[in-house]
Image (cartoon, rainbow, N blue to C red):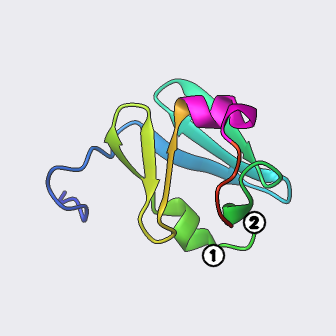
Amino acid sequence: MTSLKPPGKTTAGVEITHISGNGVWLLAGDKELFMSYEDFPWFKDAPVGKILNIEQPHPGHFYWPDLDIDLTIEIIEHPGRFPLKMM
């Protein structure tokens, strides 16, 4: 099977497992992370395909190229430490 991702991008071990009216669940390795729309409003009105298009350039660092969103495990687990800068 051939990957559609460009070479150099780490994609294994990260996927969106659920999208609901409350937020988005991300599975990174064996860790499940929840991103509520209250803390991560950029995902609320985003098309499903753009949310599902996730890359992991480095372990624990997630990037949604279609939405231009960069997040880390620390930001997802402790959003209060990182006030929103833009919407």
Residue under label 2: 44
In the image, what residue occupies the spot 16% across and 50% down?
A: 8
Q: Residues within 10 Å of mark 1 (few under 14, many from 20)?
A: few
Highlighted magenta segment, given as a residue range: 74-82
- Kind of residue at disc 1: Pro
Rendering coords of residue 40 (x, y %):
71, 53
Disc 1 designates what residue?
Answer: 47
Q: Dot 2: within a 10 Å radius of its alpha carbon, few (fewer than 14), some, or many (20 or more) residues?
A: some
74 or 24, which is in the foreground? 74
Q: Residue at x 77, y 48 (%)?
A: 39
SS at circle 2: loop
Q: Is residue 76 above or below residue 35?
A: above
Label 1: which secondary element: loop
User: Of the residues shown, which amino acid type is indicated by label 2?
Assistant: Lys
Q: Quadrant of the C terminus?
A: bottom right
Q: Residue furthest top?
A: 30
Q: Position of residue 51 (x, y in %)?
A: 57, 63
- Seen at 74% across and 60% down, the residue is 41
- Residue 70: image x %, image y %? 48, 51
The answer for how far apart the CA atoms under marks 2 and 1 are is 9 Å
Q: What kind of secondary structure does the magenta stretch mostly adopt?
A: helix
Quarter of the figure with the N terminus? bottom left
